[in-house]
Amino acid sequence: MATLTLKGLQKSYDETQVLQRVDLQVADGEFLVLVGPSGCGKSTLLRCIAGLEDISDGELQIDGKRVNDLPPRDRDVAMVFQSYALYPHMTVRENMSFGLEVRKTPQAEIRERVDAAAEMLGLEELMERLPKAMSGGQRQRVAMGRAIVRRPKVFLFDEPLSNLDASLRGQMRVELKRLHRQLDATIVYVTHDQVEALTLADRILVLNSGVVQQIGTPTDLFDHPANRFVAGFIGSPSMNFLKGEGDGESIHVGPIRVPSSHLGPVSLGVRPNEVHIDPQGAPATIDVIEHLGWELHLHLRLEDGQELTARVETSVLPDAQAGQVLKVSLGTVHLFDVESGQRLEV
Ligand SMILES: Nc1ncnc2c1ncn2[C@@H]1O[C@H](COP(=O)(O)OP(=O)(O)OP(=O)(O)O)[C@@H](O)[C@H]1O
Ligand SMILES: [Mg+2]
């Protein structure tokens, strides 16, 4: 396996700059997850690493060697796309063997590698099937198998689970985690799914408009978001942002007080699970209730009109009704500069 290094990597299409000076070091065997809104440049970044797009500026290294000008087939990188892109007229075995056949790998070795990957992915029973006779999850596993048999230095996954239903995604997530352990592979993985990002990643890179916002462990990003964008992007339901005013001892959000030495206006972030039902708290009216089995998402309105979402266990408020007035207080809060959105110390 291998390390992956991006130094000031830039990508433009004509006038539009899609990636702005991306610096990144992915360690050998690391699982790096790439997240960001639609159109922020995630697929472009993967395609640049794979060699499917030219790099406009900067350097790309695999195992410390510059590969900017190396054609895709010589980079030893395998990419798994959202659309499985299997050959429809080939069986599972043929689909998985094809890349090795093209590279003139000896037949015995092809068989051995394909069988090993099939076992890893639970595909043994399906080897003679055609893609059209398989479910989405099975096809997705074949697409992964095709990448695995190549034993590339780096795996690139572009939203590989997004076509699957929720329960299959859950299963595949666990399989991916196991696969990563077995293969000891260096992986860059794009997803829109919060749970996938937080559970699979060693580190997460958050991208917005082609600019790296933060790179860190899931816990880093969750507990210490570098700015408002990351704070709002990581975590579901999203962090609440309230307008506050600091007097040097506490921040005032309507009648709510939060201890802090901050002076002046500030954006105060609080995760929905840190909004507590508290008889000593400030009044908040329930606007909308979302029932999610064991938890409720309460969309609340404070007396000054500001809105916030609380996440509480259903058993805490079994009879919650829209229009009901609750008392709430805030637990852990985050502060952000009103202008720049950068994180401030509480
Ligand atoms: N060949 C191209 N020519 C011009 N612009 C392009 C080209 N390919 C992509 N772009 C633009 O680059 C930006 C980034 O696209 P990219 O596909 O990398 O986004 P993404 O983060 O993968 O989005 P999504 O989450 O929707 O897949 C978009 O604004 C897109 O329109
Ligand atoms: Mg994309």
Image: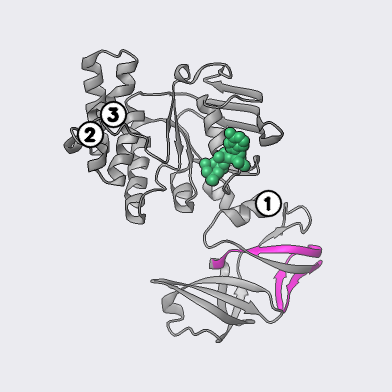
> Ligand 1 sits in which quadrant?
top right
Residue drawn at 65 percent across, 53 percent down? 229
Q: How would you classify the magenta stretch by its main secondary structure?
A: strand
Q: Where is residue 206 in the image (x, y as percent from the top left)?
A: 59, 44
Residue drawn at 57 percent across, 80 percent down? 287
Residue drawn at 51 percent across, 30 percent down? 27
Label 1, secondary structure: give it: loop
Gap between marks 2 and 3, in whole Å?
A: 15 Å
Residue, disc 1: 227
Task: Point out the stretch of residues depicted in magenta.
Answer: 246-272
Disc 1: CA contacts within 10 A as few (<14), some (14-19) or many (>=20) = many
- The numbered dot on residue 119 is 2
Q: In this view, does 271 lie to the left or right of 334?
A: left
Q: Is residue 17 left or right of residue 29?
A: right
Residue drawn at 73 percent across, 51 percent down? 342
- The numbered dot on residue 95 is 3
